[in-house]
Amino acid sequence: DVKVTQSSRYLVKRTGEKVFLECVQDMDHENMFWYRQDPGLGLRLIYFSYDVKMKEKGDIPEGYSVSREKKERFSLILESASTNQTSMYLCASSPLGREQFFGPGTRLTVL
Amino acid sequence: KQEVTQIPAALSVPEGENLVLNCSFTDSAIYNLQWFRQDPGKGLTSLLLIQSSQREQTSGRLNASLDKSSGRSTLYIAASQPGDSATYLCAVRSGANNLFFGTGTRLTVIP
């Protein structure tokens, strides 16, 4: 079975802090994704990566950056957290052109 | 830009009933369509993936259909059970890799 893990289930940070969300997949998938999910807005793509050190902006990249130094790991970075970044963050991975598999999510609260 | 709509937003049915969830999308040029299940506070579980060349996919009590020309998909759940209670999301892949999600239908199966 595909396994996608995220470093934290719940996280509470203060405004202005630098926040790292980690995602690891164990199936050698080329693609990895970061989404955020908000009530009434659904899932929105922040960034994705199709290879090591490669990244593409999604629909809402502002305020975020990403890092993919190894194939199995994709990190989402909030350089200076703000209250409007309070959300559920979901990581996913997929082989090229195939179905996406999701991690359990990280619920981030920024105070 | 692709837009995905799911109606109704919420649905309650008695146990044992067969039901249909609807998904529509605005751009018929899709690569595939994926149905997910999400339990409260959890990540997404992939249920079915339909490639653009396929008309339907089945898994156990679930059957998903795709009519690309009309921009519609349905998820049929037979003999519903309380354990089927969850939010069901559909997502279409239009671009190279990313998915466009609907906002989901929250299903409650009443024992």
Image (cartoon, rainbow, N blue to C red):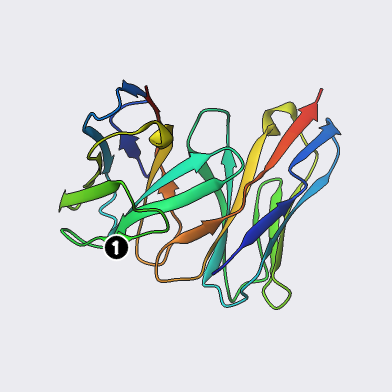
**Disc 1 residue type?**
Glu
Q: Which chain does tag 1 point to?
A: A
Location of the N terminus of chain B by quadrant is bottom right
Q: Is residue A96 left or right of residue B11?
A: left
In the rendered image, residue A104, in percent from the top left (x then y), is placed at 42, 33
Q: Is residue B48 left or right of residue A63?
A: right
Question: In the figure, A56 relative to B78: above or below?
Answer: below
Regarding residue B110, the answer to whether it shows in the image is yes
In the rendered image, residue B55, in percent from the top left (x then y), is placed at 68, 70
Provide the residue designation for mark 1.
A56
Q: Is residue B12 left or right of residue A91?
A: right
The residue drawn where x is 32% and y is 57% is A48
Q: State the SS at label 1.
A: strand
Q: Nearer the viewer, residue B76 or A79?
A: A79
Badge 1: few (under 14), some or many (20 or more) residues near its Cα, within 10 Å? few
Regarding residue A104, the answer to whether it shows in the image is no
Q: Quadrant of residue A81?
A: top left
Q: Quadrant of residue B51?
A: bottom right
Q: Nearer the viewer, residue B65 or A34?
A: A34
Location of the C terminus of chain B by quadrant is top right
In the rendered image, residue B84, in percent from the top left (x then y), is placed at 69, 34
In the rendered image, residue A9, in percent from the top left (x then y), is placed at 37, 25
Q: Quadrant of residue B38?
A: top right
The residue drawn where x is 78% and y is 30% is B109
Question: In the figure, B72 relative to A2: above or below?
Answer: below
